[in-house]
Amino acid sequence: MKKAFAMLLVAVMSASVLAGCGSSSADSQMGGEEVIKVNDTALHKNYVDARIDQVFKQNQLESDDAFSGYYKSQIITGLVETELMVQEAKERGIEVSDEDKENYKSELIEQSYGSQENFDSYLSEYNISDDMLDRMLEEKLYYDKLIDELKKDVKVDPETYYNEHKDEFNVGDQVKAAHILVEDEDTAKKIIKKLDDGEDFAKLAKEYSKDTATADQGGELGYFTADKMVTEFSDAAFALEKGKYTETPVKTSYGYHIILCEDKQAAHQQTYDEVKDELTETLTNQEVQSKYQELIEKRKKDSKIEYLSDDYNPDKLVAKAEEEMAKQQEDSSASSETGGAQQSASDDATASADSSSTEESGK
């Protein structure tokens, strides 16, 4: 849930956590020598290193792993593509103001973190400077505005798609539910008591739920099949009668839930009217992403991209990683052969000893 802020970081992690508000100085993170040039814009060593470290930490990757060169190459490619995207947006006359950034930041805090304190606490883990935060907000907003512009020219035909792919719209038994998520069982029991006393479920969800993605909507989860939720949650939700809520807290790895069953649907083939809005959005997003990738690939061909250091050249990083992998494989093979030879020698010695023992016994 905390990874809601899609930052366009890189191919290795297309949706990343926003990191920021650390104590590092702007000079330490945004400066350093130029290591990449994208047309007339330079990416500096400390900035690229900080973004690489961020993604490695978010994905629990090891910098000394044999695959690290592959990961770094993907991250750097992503940063270059992000810069190309920003340049494309600016050339189209798209602008991002300080007010845009502040509004987006406030929206992010409200919808995904619940409070400034939670936001600061979570983000400080990544130790990214305010300047880095500002740059990442800017990148995200340029991306959103460019996507909105590309979307204007997209036309899709959801009804034809539906008629040609009806099998895709067969769904199993579904339940429509809402939930309130809290950290401890005592709080969950307290909320259930309030429900027993007639208090409104949606109001309590807004007040208590730690699921910031649904709290503002009264805990609404919509319709889902059993396989879409963790087992404990699904079992409890599907066991409820329509209009009933769980009388005891439901414990999952996320915490303690109070679940309200709002409706149930038997397995069926969804009608076009049921899926029209979601299908239109899905097909539109697919078409927009296709146009976006085509745009980025064209800009790559038309741009001057210079890697000023082999340590930041994706092709060189991949080649180095392949060499390291090959060396590891050779070392592993050599070790296996040595082990096999040693075992063979041991077996020979054992056989010789057994033979000598047999001869002694026969005397």
Image: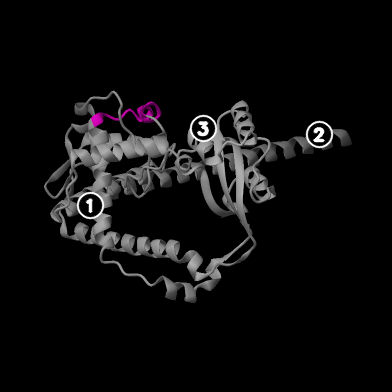
Residue 245 coordinates in the image, percent (x, y): 64, 42
Q: Is residue 363 visible?
A: no
Mark number displayed over residue 19: none
Residue 127 on the magenta segment: yes
Mark number displayed over residue 357: 2
Disc 1 residue type (three-letter): Met
Residue at the far right in the pictured view: 362
Task: Choose the circle earlier in sequence order: 1 or 3.
Answer: 1
Distance of mark 1 from mark 2, alpha carbons?
Answer: 80 Å
Q: Residues within 10 Å of mark 2 (few under 14, many from 20)?
A: few
Q: Residues within 10 Å of mark 1 (few under 14, many from 20)?
A: many
Along the line of sight, the residue nearer the viewer: 251 or 292: 251
Task: Choose the circle earlier in sequence order: 1 or 2.
Answer: 1
Task: Choose the circle earlier in sequence order: 2 or 3.
Answer: 3
Q: Quadrant of residue 110?
A: top left
Q: Is residue 312 visible?
A: yes
- Depth check, mark 1 against mark 3: the one in front is 3
* Left-right relation of 174 to 28: right
Q: Which residue is mark 3?
A: 208
Q: Residue at x 48, y 39 (%)?
A: 215
Residue 362 coordinates in the image, percent (x, y): 88, 36
Distance of mark 2 from mark 3, alpha carbons?
Answer: 80 Å
Disc 3 residue type (three-letter): Tyr
Residue 31 coordinates in the image, percent (x, y): 18, 31
Residue 326 coordinates in the image, percent (x, y): 42, 47
- Depth check, mark 2 against mark 3: the one in front is 3
**Callout 2 secondary element:** helix
Residue 20 on the magenta segment: no
